[in-house]
Amino acid sequence: MFVFRIDSNSGVPPYLQLVQQVRQGVLLGFLAEGDRLPLIREVSETVAINPNTVAKAYRQLEQEGLVTGRPGQGTFVNATEAAPVSPATYTSLQRGLETWLGRARAAGLDEQAINALFTAALNKARNENIA
Amino acid sequence: MTEHALQTDGLGKRYRRTWALQDCSLSVPSGRVTALVGPNGAGKSTFLRLVVGLLAPTTGSVEVLGRPATDTPQALSRIGFLAQDHPLYKHFTVAELLRVGRSCNLRFDQELAERRLRQLDIPLDRKAGALSGGQQAQVALALALGKRPDLLVLDEPMASLDPVARLEFLQALMGAVAEDGMTVLFSSHVVPELERVCDHLIVLNHSRVTVAGDIDDLLTEHRLLVGPRTTADLDRSGTVVEATHSERHTTLLVRDGGAPAAPGWQASPVGLEDLVLSYLRQPARKEVAA
């Protein structure tokens, strides 16, 4: 059974942490088509998290088409149609990021500075998307 | 079930000349887990005692599950209350405490309480005083849950527990919420762990409610604005909750405000902890916009 974890200090809203873990699980192949996600009650009890939060995460995953809820049975992982990110793209993106990290380090940025820069860029992109 | 598990209107409590709680008007929807946050002496325990009918209001009213808090024994039987430091009769065994629970309540699910405690490996023949602090808290919680309450009120339930016991307590509580769908209201002053368990927030400070609402809504409504130092009023919308200035830049927490038009300003979302702390740092005021 898929196991969730919650980092209370990450600053990422708990429901989003759950969503991201399922997305990543599918992306990395830990979750395959037909796998049942733990019941809301099970997640609540094992990670000590509000059931409404779990329900919200599952709703969002359903809207994204990653999973399907079947009343009385549970929530199941869908087939990933033509993998939204192919392993090759994934690897190439990661390589690109690694190259960029190398340049940042060479320029004298430490991990904190890199994080700050990344977060600022992410926020900027997010704001532009909304506007 | 009523739409609101709890509704207060102009609720206030005065002890002699001191107001412990003033002008408290709010509602908590059914099925939610609400955190009541505030510094010591802010009026949290007074508020909770008014809700469960252990105190009578000086002004205003409080309605629980659609009726006045202290209406009838039937109304009280739907409310579970766990007081601070989870008091138990220390010389009673766990089994004896469960019997007290069964005898003193109109409805009491002994089987449920026993099952909970067995799952946690808490021996029923042990005296309560001989249990660890975490186990005592679990016994007190099992007793409160044994009532199968529609509203469970907990006053600082985890204040004296170590980190492992805190997590175990929250696991038991969240499991019960998922199973029964009850409404929970609890006070705490530990903010970081609130976000995972709560979906509704009430901040009390200086005997008044400074902010209350759905946590997702509150996080969407508030923005952190950072820009070059300014003490002048910016061209922006919304209310400033808190302004902090350093030598070169200014940080504003605003509610219902967009990004300022001025150049050099950046808006970013705010975390729950920062939001709560900003409200807790606000000085006492005569008029508070709820």
Image: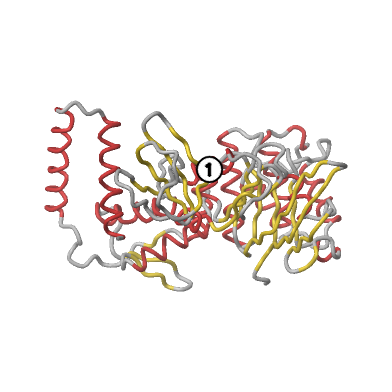
Q: Is B290 positioned to the left or the right of B151 in the image?
A: left
| Residue found at x 17% / y 35% | A101
Residue B211 place in picture, x, y as percent: 59, 51
| Residue found at x 15% / y 28% | A107
Residue B126 place in picture, x, y as percent: 75, 37
Between residue A1 and residue B234, name the one nearer to us.
Answer: B234
Residue A130 falls in image quadrant:
bottom left
Between residue B254 and residue B30, name the one nearer to us.
Answer: B254
Between residue B258 and residue B169, name the one nearer to us.
Answer: B258
Q: Is B199 positioned to the left or the right of B42 in the image?
A: left
Q: Is B264 positioned to the left or the right of B235 in the image?
A: left
Per the image, label 1 sits on a secondary structure element best described as loop
Residue B155 falls in image quadrant:
top right
Residue at the limit of the structure toward the front, as seen here: B232
Residue type indicated by callout 1: Glu
**Up-down relation of residue B2 to residue B13 (above or below):** below
Residue B93 place in picture, x, y as percent: 79, 40
Colour setting: secondary structure
**Up-down relation of residue B175 to residue A69 (above or below):** above
Q: Quadrant of the C terminus of chain B?
A: bottom right
Residue B190 place in picture, x, y as percent: 58, 39
Q: Residues within 10 Å of mark 1 (few under 14, many from 20)?
A: some
| Residue found at x 66% / y 50% | B287
Residue at the limit of the structure toward the right, as seen here: B16
Between residue A55 and residue B67, name the one nearer to us.
Answer: B67
| Residue found at x 62% / y 64% | B29
- Location of mark 1 (residue): B193
Residue at the limit of the structure toward the top, as seen here: A108
Q: Quadrant of the N terminus of chain B?
A: bottom right
Query: Exactly how many numbered labels are in the figure?
Result: 1
Q: Is B37 positioned to the left or the right of A131 in the image?
A: right
**Chain letter for mark 1:** B
